[in-house]
Image (spheres, rainbow, N blue to C red):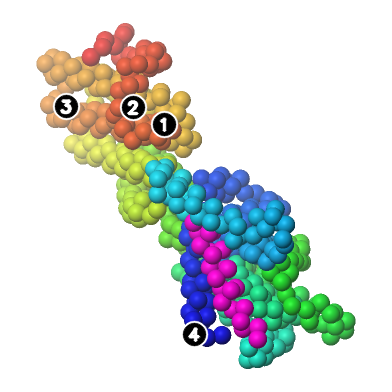
């Protein structure tokens, strides 16, 4: 083997690792929405979690990526530690899919149909299709599909290049002696763990082992311990990702390490016992690509079969290794690690935005209740909630901007943009709650009060505001377009109510029934409540836009008002429901 073979091997290895990386990233983007759906259907059942981990890892071709996601989910509260344990076990089985795909390179037959299964036969076609999809399609989904095919073609080409470059090593005595060292199982485990820890992918390290097996110098006795060590080495990614996370996320990473260390210790002991007692001839035979794939799958299935019934014990073990502490974990935590899986990061943002929405609406309702009597406790609660919504907006806005800068699907990008608008509206609703509070505090400090007529009008407007808040909140929390469509007719009625109340107020001033000083406060109250309804309308418009993949809120609302008979029916219902005296005329 000369310098040119070494350079070819390095080039093949580089292409292999690069292809696996870009294929995995494109698969994550392409499957993003489905990953979110799968996550939403997770249960605490062992089999459900196991199958989820297996399926997600089989799709994105990396147990390390799945485990890092799981650490992020646990850190963000999207998944419990018990769920994480089952998913991690499934991920270890799912990662074996890559070895089976790579084993196709070992097919050797003169039959034309069998030869078509060899990567060298079908990969050029996949590469051509991938180039067409990536270069000539405008759809982001089709571009991602093209990247998946190009990534797969690149890694398979790299695999073939590596295998061809190292074939000559089979005749090199030093290389033969090197693999004789790995017949010592402990050396094999150490070598596998170190290699995988360096490249941070068990799938990639198994692929490298399969390429080396093409030399004919890798026996099953050497390959099996290396495969066991690879499962330990792949834990380095999850352990690194847990740095700076909460205790449950650290426990999830520790589960991954403990699972693989315990599984390797048990089955390595069994392997050594079988080797010492029975000395199977198979262990001395040269490992094939197919045989390595079988060994990789068998080991991971055996580990899962061993540990799955003991998942409760594993949970208690990691809880002892990483005990509880007094640290209060932030409810609003957003894990940067989730940005590598945009759809899941977006789901976490929606979860926090839902908390923000509930906080904002609660603050406004508390402010509305101050007309019945001022309470210092209620006033403080309103201010605390408004401060919390400011915090929510700060962290969500920053996170969503970072997320939007990533390569994400068109639908995720549109939803992120709409979510940015929505959180801005909820933050402003909370601001108006403080404005209302200050208006009632001004009345109290000056010993003023609303007239009976003004109070009667306030009760009507307050009831309408409470309903529009409930409608917009429900529409957002449940992505309910039908509920969202009920908001705009009510907002129009509230606009009319405000103008009617201004007219009534002017008449009271002219009749001397209301003081100018109270009038200023009353005007501020009306303005704030009308603006709250505007923000509710914006929120409902965003919900409809997300459903229609339309970024123009005002156009959606205008079209609904002009073209919808349902809008006119609902408008008439609300007009009668919240009439001050008789019917409210159009304004």
Q: Is residue 294 left or right of residue 549?
A: right
Of 148 and 452, nearer the camera is: 148
Marks 4 and 2, how far apart at CA? 66 Å
Is 156 a magenta residue?
Answer: yes
Mark 1 touching mark 3, by CB under 8 A? Answer: no
The numbered mark, 1 or 3, whose residue comes first in the sequence reads 3
Crowding at label 4, few (<14), some or many (≥20) Cα neighbours within 10 Å? few
Can you identify the residue that label 4 sits on? 3
The numbered mark, 4 or 2, whose residue comes first in the sequence reads 4
Does residue 445 sit above or below 372 in this rendering? below
Mark 2 touching mark 1, by CB under 8 A? Answer: yes
Q: Residue furthest right?
A: 278
Of 485 and 467, nearer the camera is: 485
Does residue 309 sit above or below 142 in this rendering? below
Residue for point 26% across, 22% down: 495
The numbered mark, 2 or 1, whose residue comes first in the sequence reads 1
- Across and down, in percent, residue 276 comes to 84, 85
Can you identify the residue that label 1 sits on? 548
Q: Report the span colored magenta.
A: 150-171
Can you identify the residue that label 3 sits on? 519
Can you identify the residue that label 2 sits on? 556
Secondary element type, mark 4: helix
Does residue 375 sit above or below 250 in this rendering? above
Q: Is residue 53 visible?
A: no
Mark 2 touching mark 3, by CB under 8 A? Answer: no
Residue mark closest to the camera, 1 vs 4: 4
Helix, strand or loop for the magenta stretch, by majority:
helix
Marks 3 and 4, how far apart at CA? 91 Å
The numbered mark, 1 or 4, whose residue comes first in the sequence reads 4
Marks 1 and 4, how far apart at CA? 59 Å
Q: Quadrant of residue 439?
A: top left
């Amino acid at each position: 083997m000369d310098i040119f073979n070494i350079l070819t091997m390095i080039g093949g290895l580089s292409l292999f690792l690069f292809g696996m990386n870009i294929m995995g990233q494109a698969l994550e983007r392409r499957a993003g929405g489905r990953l979110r759906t799968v996550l939403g259907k997770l249960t605490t059942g062992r089999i459900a979690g196991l199958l989820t981990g297996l399926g997600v890892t089989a799709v994105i071709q990396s147990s390390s990526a799945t485990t890092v996601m799981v650490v992020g989910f646990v850190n963000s509260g999207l998944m419990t530690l018990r769920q994480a344990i089952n998913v991690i076990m499934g991920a270890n089985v799912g990662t074996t899919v890559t070895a089976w795909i790579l084993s196709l390179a070992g097919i050797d037959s003169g039959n034309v149909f069998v030869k078509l299964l060899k990567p060298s036969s079908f990969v050029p076609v996949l590469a051509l299709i991938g180039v067409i999809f990536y270069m000539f399609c405008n759809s982001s989904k089709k571009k991602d599909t093209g990247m998946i095919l190009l990534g797969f073609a690149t890694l398979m080409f790299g695999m073939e290049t590596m295998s061809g470059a190292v074939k000559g090593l089979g005749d090199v005595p030093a290389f033969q002696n090197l693999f004789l060292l790995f017949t010592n199982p402990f050396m094999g485990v150490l070598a596998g763990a170190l290699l995988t820890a360096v490249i941070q992918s068990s799938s990639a390290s198994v692929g490298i082992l399969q390429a080396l097996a093409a030399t004919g110098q890798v026996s099953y006795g050497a390959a099996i311990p290396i495969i066991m060590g690879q499962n330990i080495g792949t834990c380095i990614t999850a352990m690194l990702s847990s740095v700076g996370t909460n205790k449950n996320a650290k426990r999830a990473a520790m589960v991954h390490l403990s699972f693989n260390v315990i599984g390797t210790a048990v089955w390595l002991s069994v392997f050594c016992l079988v080797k010492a007692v029975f000395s199977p001839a198979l262990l001395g035979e040269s490992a094939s690509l197919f045989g390595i794939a079988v060994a990789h799958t068998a080991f991971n299935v055996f580990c899962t079969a061993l540990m799955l019934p003991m998942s409760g014990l594993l949970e208690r073990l990691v809880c002892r290794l990483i005990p509880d502490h007094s640290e209060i974990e932030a409810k609003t935590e957003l894990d940067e690690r989730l940005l590598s899986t945009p759809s899941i990061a977006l789901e976490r943002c929606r979860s926090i935005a839902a908390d923000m929405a509930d906080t904002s609406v609660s603050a406004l309702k508390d402010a509305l209740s101050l007309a019945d009597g001022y309470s210092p406790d209620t006033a403080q609660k309103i201010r605390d909630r408004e401060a919390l919504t400011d915090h929510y907006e700060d962290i969500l806005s920053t996170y969503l901007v970072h997320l939007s800068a990533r390569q994400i699907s068109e639908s995720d990008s549109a939803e992120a943009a709409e979510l940015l608008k929505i959180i801005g509206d909820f933050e402003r609703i909370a601001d108006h709650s403080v404005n209302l509070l200050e208006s009632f505090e001004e009345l109290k400090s000056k010993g003023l009060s609303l007239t009976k007529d003004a109070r009667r009008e306030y009760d009507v407007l307050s009831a309408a505001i409470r309903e529009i808040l409930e409608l917009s909140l429900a529409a957002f929390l449940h992505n309910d377009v039908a509920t969202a469509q009920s908001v705009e007719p009510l907002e129009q009625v509230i606009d009319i109510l405000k103008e009617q109340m201004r007219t009534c107020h002017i008449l009271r001033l002219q009749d001397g029934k209301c003081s100018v000083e109270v009038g200023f406060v009353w005007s501020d109250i009306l303005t704030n409540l009308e603006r709250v309804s505007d923000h509710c309308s914006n929120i409902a418009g965003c919900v409809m836009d997300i459903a229609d993949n339309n970024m123009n809120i005002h156009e959606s609302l205008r079209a609904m008002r002009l073209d919808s008979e349902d809008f006119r029916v609902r408008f008439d219902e609300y007009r009668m429901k919240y009439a001050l005296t008789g019917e409210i005329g159009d304004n």
